[in-house]
Image: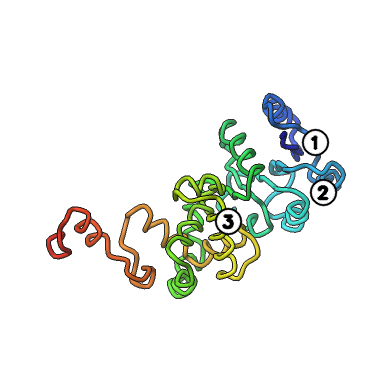
Amino acid sequence: MNMRVLLCCDESIMSAGIRALLNEQPDVQVVGHSSGRDCARITARSRPDIVLVISPALSIEHRRELAQLAAMAKVVLIPKAENTHRSLEAVRQGVSAVLAPDTSADELIHTLRTISSGEAMVIPKATRRALFSLPGSRDSDTASRLLGTLTPREAEVLLLLARGSSNTEIAGKLSVSEATVRSHVHHLLRKLNVESRTQAVALAYESGIMAAMEERAEGKSDPPAEFRFPGEKRAGERKGRRQGKSPGQAR
């Protein structure tokens, strides 16, 4: 089934180029073009699946407008380069994906397909790193309290959600069914007291959960005691066990 895309862009040359790219895709139907000023009205009329917003037509500062669009369709925002570190502000308004201005054509199309096919949210990797320096992103007390409410598998699912994985991709990475993934998502939303995946991911970044989980996942450092799950060992102990050594021998 084709995805219906509305393009919101004030720059005519860029708009023509992106529209030509989208029209080349067999599964994409461009249902219209709008300026930032008319985007909400045209979205309500044309009822697209996705609104692709290119700044400066609308920017991260247009919180009310982005929230209004997100209530009617999935929103993919390409902000100005100097604002990509503020992606979380757009996520809070319900934006499904925030892409850097230098995103490749292939990555843009992949993102549109990912957003259209499921409930994934996409934030560029470089931008995710910038989010770790946000005020409060290293609040160990808040992060440990929230992380302590999740099972290790729910924490894995939250990490993959924040990385932009769809249910299908998460199921493949964790070798479980999509129904199991949906169950984990339902439980972690309830435990974090949020209503949507985007809210869960925003909370994870703001609280410091993401910084702790990324460090654990990449093996850059042992998680502090307050970030470890019950029974979780330190990296040296895990390595020693895999090699058939005792924790003392591993050292």
| Residue type indicated by callout 2 | Ala
141 relative to 80, above or below: below
Other-residue count near label 1 (Cα within 10 Å), few / some / many at <14 / 14–19 / ≥20: many
Q: Which mark is residue 33?
A: 1
Mark 2–mark 1 contact, CB under 8 Å?
no
x, y (%) of residue 186? 59, 62
Left or right: 42 as drawn, with respect to 243: right
- Rendered residue at 38%/57% (across/down): 215
Mark 2–mark 3 contact, CB under 8 Å?
no
| Residue type indicated by callout 3 | Arg
Tag 1, which secondary structure?
Answer: strand
Whichever of labels 2 and 3 marks the residue nearer the N terminus, that label is: 2
State which quarter of the image contains the C terminus. Answer: bottom left
Q: Which mark is residue 40?
A: 2
223 relative to 71, above or below: below
Nearest the viewer among 149 and 19 is: 149
